[in-house]
Image (tube, coloured by chain):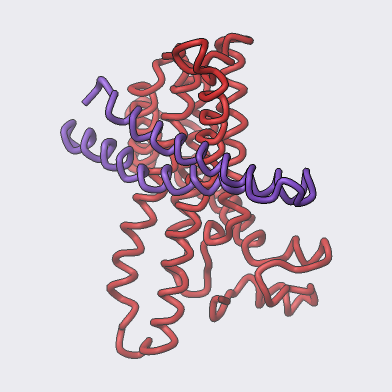
Chain colours: A red, B purple
Amino acid sequence: MEHPILFVSLLLEKLGLPVPHGLVGHTLLEKLVSPHMTYTWLLMLFLIIVPKLTMGSKLTLVPSKSQNFWEVIIGGLEEFMTENMGKDGARMMFPMIATFALYILVANLVGLMPGFMSPTSNLNITLGCTLIVFVTTHILGLKYHGLGYVKHFLGPMPWLIPLMLPIEIVSHLARILSLSIRLFGNIMAKEVLLAILFMLAGAYFAPLPILVLGVLVSVVQAGVFVLLSVIYFSGAMEHAH
Amino acid sequence: MPENRKEIMKLLADFGTIGMAVAFSIFIGVGIGYFLDNKVFGGRTRPWFTLIFLGVGVAAAFKNLYMMTKRKDL
């Protein structure tokens, strides 16, 4: 399913770059200019430039309007993480989680504007985010428990080990699937539904209710991704049950 | 956001993922079994690893449900 008009892709096509018409191209250059990549870069630029512009270079003790806005977002995120992971864990993991939160939130919401698409409606992007979370979980576990981290996989009793080990491995692998496919599925459903409704009855504002629901879905899914990664991290950091 | 609402959102996100955890556990189990049968052993052990790991996947799914019932913070 292709989005009707993607203006970054159109611009790149005018520049003579081979923008693929399917989801992903074949050559390296086609892969680099495929829509989800170019829109990810656009969002990265957005997330770097806009806070710089709105906040200015120095922070003041009495916050200005824009500084207040960012303080609410960042402060709220950090408070939420401190509740779940403790102060030290929140301090350590804050840059990564905040990056995921802001990136996924903006990436979900940008698909609501005509001419843009959500990079998160491509499984490759969400799978990338999920694999980072998955690997970080186990690195955190190894860091906090050393080799004793294996106990997380062995269950409560020694004679249950042959049964519990495959079960635990399977349920850890299922986290990759559920975390990535949930985000991808929700956002792609939103995008496809909007495109279809726009094609069928765009002149009669048929996509409008789905746009409203799209805002809700975008915020909720970004929140769920962050919440679940924080829960996985804190699960790896605490002692085996 | 009031404290109660926040707690409810957290629980909603937690319990809203049960269905997915169950479904994907089973899929991962079948996937591992299928891979062992057809790629590692070349089809000589055809139905058995798939069936065994299907059982493991179902067990993992039920273990997830069981852990949910054992939570102390509700």
Nearer-the-camera pick, A197 or B31: B31
The percent position of residue B33, horizontal first and vertical second, equals 63, 44
Q: In what quadrant of the picture does the N terminus of chain A appear?
A: bottom right
Q: Position of residue A119 (x, y in %)?
A: 56, 59
- Does A238 appear above or below B27? above
Residue at image point 33% right, 38% down:
B14
Q: Which image quarter: residue A129?
A: top right
Residue B67 in the image: above or below residue A203:
above
Looking at the image, which residue is at 58% across and 74% down? A6
Quarter-of-image position of residue B1: top left
**Quadrant where the image shows the C terminus of chain A:** top left
Q: Position of residue B35 (x, y in %)?
A: 69, 47
Q: From the viewer's side, name the closer residue of A83 and A69.
A: A83
Say which of A1 and A45 sits in front. A1
Residue at x 58%, y 57% (from the top left corner): A123
Q: Is residue A22 above or below residue A141?
A: below
